[in-house]
Image: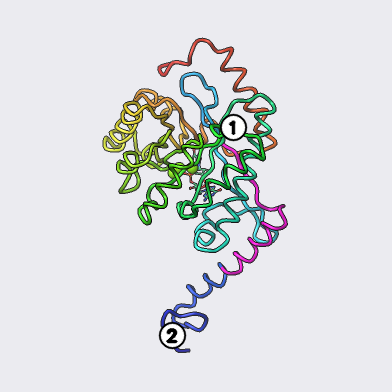
């Protein structure tokens, strides 16, 4: 076989890459079926909690794919190819629709908890997105402030103007914005000065290293301080231990998410958990102490 430049199907010198792209094409075809059949893509839901009271501050929707042949797939197994395909718009609308269905149930049950949805930066290049989200919010009768859109700033460098405008429109509609994985990108600080956001999510990598790395601890402290100065919420991601929880509280962080509190769970489990969290936090007048 002759390696073809920019090559497609006969590049024998790199059969692994070839196999991978063939596999990605198959995966994308299967995703098209999954979106149409509406029975394979599900949201796992993970609450974030207030570190002082234990009350839920929000719930993040994380996509899972119950693939008929490949088994359970996580976003790491398929998001990249979807982002680079023409199915991104359909996929994004699908996830938003599922999340708003859940948010509408909570609203009917009297649970005042926002739902967070992860958006691929590329989906923000579509100027129709705000109108579509507005339509979906009205259809589900969900107040805009109950929806938080999580954006990863690392991928937001290109085509800034379109993205800024889309985000500004969404925020003017009352939708909340969060910067996901804060501190990992080159543009973290520039991002918050350019776009008005409501929440910063401290990346898990800093939470993990906090105990042994003064630099990681300093970044957490600085992020918490920045959020405080700007009047933003701050949520630490990936908290797995009681030690991390205490260290975060000592650094002034007010909310956290992670296996230490809850793993992502199926939609049919979340209402009961949220109901009990809301009850507990109302009864719990004395806040849990960090040294406690
Ligand atoms: P993320 O938004 O930063 O989400 C946090 C990830 O950490 C999730 O992985 C979550 O399951 C995991 N996690 C939560 N707590 C802990 C913990 O205590 N320890 C550890 N080790 N991990 C924890 P997941 O679900 O595999 O998602 C990975 C990434 O995929 C997300 O990162 C997000 O960027 C992206 N993603 C998830 N759902 C969607 C979606 O619907 N659309 C798009 N575009 N991206 C999504
Ligand atoms: Mg996220
Ligand atoms: Mg994150
Ligand atoms: Mg992260």
Q: Which residue is mark 2?
A: 3
Q: Quadrant of residue 142?
A: top right
Number of numbered tags placed on the structure image: 2
SS at mark 1 in the image? loop
Measured from the top left, where is residue 265 in percent x and y? Answer: 62, 38
User: Which sits in the foreground, 96 or 164?
Assistant: 164
Residue neighbourhood size for the residue with mark 2, other residues' Cα within 10 Å, grouped as few (<14), some (14–19), many (≥20): few
Q: Which image quarter is the C terminus in?
A: top left
Quadrant in which ligand 3 is drawn: top left
Give the residue displayed 52% in from the left and 71% down from the top: 21
Is residue 45 visible to the viewer in this orientation of the structure? Answer: yes
Query: Is there any visible trace of residue 47 in the rendered image?
Result: no
Q: Is residue 80 left or right of residue 223?
A: right
Secondary structure type for disc 2: loop
In this view, the residue in front, 184 or 113, is: 113
Mark 2 or 1, closer to the camera? 1
The quadrant where residue 35 appears:
bottom right
Magenta region, residue range: 25-47
């Amino acid at each position: 076989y002759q390696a073809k430049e920019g090559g497609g199907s006969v590049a024998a010198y790199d059969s692994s890459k070839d196999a991978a792209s063939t596999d990605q094409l198959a995966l994308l075809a299967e995703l098209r079926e999954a979106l149409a059949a509406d029975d394979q893509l599900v949201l796992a839901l993970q609450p974030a909690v207030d570190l002082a009271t234990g009350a839920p501050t929000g719930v993040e929707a994380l996509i899972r794919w119950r693939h008929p042949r490949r088994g359970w797939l996580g976003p790491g197994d398929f998001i990249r190819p979807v982002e680079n395909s023409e199915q991104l718009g359909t996929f994004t609308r699908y996830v938003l629709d599922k999340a708003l269905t859940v948010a509408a149930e909570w609203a009917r049950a009297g649970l005042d908890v926002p739902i967070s949805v992860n958006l691929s930066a590329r989906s923000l290049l579509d100027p129709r997105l705000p109108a579509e989200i507005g339509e979906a919010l009205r259809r589900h009768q969900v107040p805009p402030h109950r929806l938080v859109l999580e954006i990863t700033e690392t991928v937001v460098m290109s085509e800034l103007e379109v993205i800024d405008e889309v985000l500004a429109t969404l925020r003017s509609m009352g939708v909340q914005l969060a910067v996901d994985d804060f501190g990992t990108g080159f543009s973290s600080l520039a991002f918050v000065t350019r776009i008005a956001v409501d929440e910063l999510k401290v990346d898990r990598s800093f939470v993990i290293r906090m105990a042994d790395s003064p630099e990681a601890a300093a970044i957490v402290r600085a992020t918490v301080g920045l959020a405080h100065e700007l009047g933003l919420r701050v949520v630490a991601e990936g908290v797995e231990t009681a030690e991390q929880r205490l260290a975060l509280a000592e650094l002034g962080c007010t909310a956290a998410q992670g296996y230490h509190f809850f793993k992502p769970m199926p939609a049919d489990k979340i209402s009961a958990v949220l109901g009990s969290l809301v009850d507990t936090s109302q009864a719990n007048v004395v806040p849990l102490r960090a040294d406690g």
